[in-house]
Image (tube, rainbow, N blue to C red):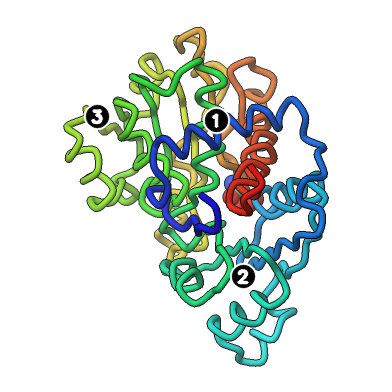
Amino acid sequence: MKNRSLISIDDFSKAEWIKILDIAEDFEKNPKQRILEGQVVATLFFEPSTRTRLSFESAASYLGAKVIGFTDAASSSVKKGETLNDTILTVSNYSDIIVMRHPREGSARYASEVAPVPVINAGDGANQHPTQTLLDLYSIRKTQGTLDDLNITFVGDLKYGRTVHSLVIALCNFNATFHLVSPQELKLPSYIKRHIKERKLKYHQYTDLNEAIPSSDILYMTRVQKERFSDPIEYEKVKNAYILNNAMLEDAKEKMKVLHPLPRVNEINEDVDTNPKAYYFQQAQNGVYVRQALLTSILGVK
Ligand code: CP
């Protein structure tokens, strides 16, 4: 993985995903190791973020690296009209690795093609969010004891949810059965569904969330991605399509866990937070260990 960019989840092999998860397990036991001293990590966030940016910065800081970057393109020379090409070439002069989030699909791939340093995609529009996928896989393996043969239910905005797209592609390598719960308007795009069909895996589509819960090992809730809608009226129609509450979990499997990449708006009622099946805040914490594993692997220290 040394010096390689991670833009799409399948830029790394299944064996490499597992290696990252194993390294992350070691970091979970001992996160404060100053093995990246002297390295500089740039975080360029052209879109808002709490977890991805701060967990990358936390991961880098625990490892002794310095972090530079911006959290708002309006505070950078992008505001003066600088191109992505020029920003990336410039920041490459100041850093050993670039972590970038951008609203445009394909922007991260483009950045990786022009940058002389590795680029990690921290989310490009509605396309992919591969580092979220690795922490999701870590969370699934940790809670279920395996990644194989699981029933995974995705709920909400399957059309624009980049975390869903990357995770479906990854889970196609683990013989998952997919349960896809969404309004008609927010169904999983056919180019992602193609991965499921090519592997001849089972998938079931629902509009009623209650139908999918009893068979689920993982219930992966998502926010309706307001920022991707061109028509606000269309967003209003679907924004409250699914709101999970505690009572709805009564018939769930004992080991089932509720995941959510976060932020949530109102798709998980706060009464679920104290249910032992709620795992979304631990999931966010796992992001630190997985991102430590990624930074050290790509920078050639692990
Ligand atoms: N899961 C995730 O991408 O969260 P942020 O938008 O807060 O980074």
Residue underneath mark 3: 204
Q: State the residue at coordinates (61%, 91%).
A: 81
Q: CA distance from mark 3 to mark 2?
A: 36 Å
Front tag of 1 and 2: 1
- How crowded pointer 3 is (Cα within 10 Å; few <14, some 14-19, many 20+) is rated as few
From the viewer's perspective, is residue 37 above or below residue 249? below
Marks 1 and 2 in Cβ contact (< 8 Å): no
Q: State the residue at coordinates (44%, 52%).
A: 162
Marks 1 and 3 in Cβ contact (< 8 Å): no
Residue underneath mark 2: 46
Q: Position of residue 120 (x, y in %)?
A: 55, 58
Image side of residue 165 versus residue 273, left or right: left
Q: Quadrant of the C terminus?
A: top right
Which residue type carries mark 2?
Phe
Q: CA distance from mark 1 to mark 2?
A: 27 Å
Image side of residue 227 versus residue 191, left or right: right
Between 3 and 69, the one lying in front of the other is 3
Q: Position of residue 298 (x, y in %)?
A: 58, 52
Residue underneath mark 1: 138
